[in-house]
Image: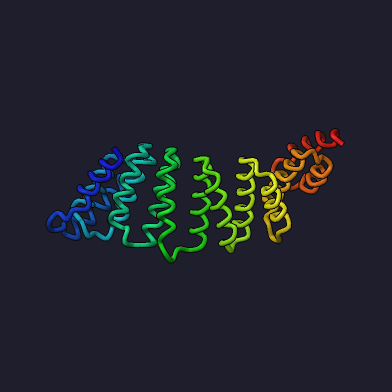
Amino acid sequence: MRRCLIIIFASLFLMVQGCEKTADETSQVIEKARSNFISGFYVDAEKGFERYLQDNPQGSNRFEAWDYLVKIAYEVRHDSERGASILEAMYLEFGHNGALAAKLKRKLAEMYIRNGQYKIAVEALEKSLEFPDQPQEQLDSTRVTLAETFRKLRNYDLAIYTYSDLAESTKDIKTKARALFEMAHTLTLIQAWERAESELERLNKMDGVPEDIHAEAAFMLADIYEHRHEYKRAAELLEQVVDTYPNPYAVRFKLNYLKKKY
């Protein structure tokens, strides 16, 4: 079904259909479509943007028209399948532009993730990483999403690898710290306690780690100590973050429990 929709959109909007309309007609069509969208007349807006795409195969506002169609499909109608199909058709037109193509694939992946289509999302995310000259922040964000998606698929090995690669490649200390924390969390899901402990201890020794991530890492590390029945060691670690952990009541509750154990 998705492939059929893509073909339909591509055939409707990407074929050159004779001569373009005059500049005045084109301007009126796109402006009327914008006005209808702003006013909430989404059916009329959709027809206007579709007409613009059909009549202006080389139009300067094609990307904007496509983008509005995505918004109408996904945000207004909550039709993620149609929205994804429009994005795929957009990619067919703008895929030669590396900067736009990377963002389109990323946006497409996010739509698939919201729809629970994680395997297709992984394909889109991996493709988006292939385009050169992307800002480091954008690459980091895509890798974070890719790792999270692997984890949702329970492909923990690839999630761990992706978090590890991100931690080594990023220049942003917050991103590095979050990647190490999430990698440690993923390691606990496969009961790789020793490696998780090693990564968390590494994180706790780093300079410049945001306070909240440091506290979360300490809390998780305390859980590992508790798992090994090292109750005093766990309590001592928690006492260091009782005022910085996002949920101080959880820390105090665990502290009271641990102190009864030794």
Q: Is residue 64 above or below residue 42?
A: below
Q: Is residue 134 above or below residue 41?
A: below
Image mark count: 0
Name the spot of residue 46 as percent of width and height, x first. 27, 44
- Residue at 43%, 51% (x, y): give it: 125
140 vs 96, left or right, is right
In the rendered image, which quarter contains the N terminus? top left
How are the residues colored?
rainbow
Q: Is residue 84 above or below residue 20?
A: above
- Residue at 64%, 50% (x, y): give it: 181
Name the spot of residue 16 as percent of width and height, x first. 17, 56
Q: Nearer the viewer, residue 99 or 156?
A: 156
120 vs 258, left or right, is left
- Residue at 32%, 53% (x, y): give it: 91
In the rendered image, which quarter contains the C terminus? top right
Q: Nearer the viewer, residue 37 or 9?
A: 9
Name the spot of residue 137 as percent of width and height, x first. 52, 60
Q: Nearer the viewer, residue 22 or 242?
A: 242
Name the spot of residue 238 as percent of width and height, x first. 78, 44
Q: In which quadrant of the rendered view does residue 232 lie?
A: top right
Farthest residue, direction right: 262
Farthest residue, direction left: 18
83 vs 188, left or right, is left
Q: In which quadrant of the rendered view does residue 99 lie?
A: bottom left
Q: In which quadrant of the rendered view does residue 132 lie?
A: bottom left
- Residue at 18%, 55% (x, y): give it: 25
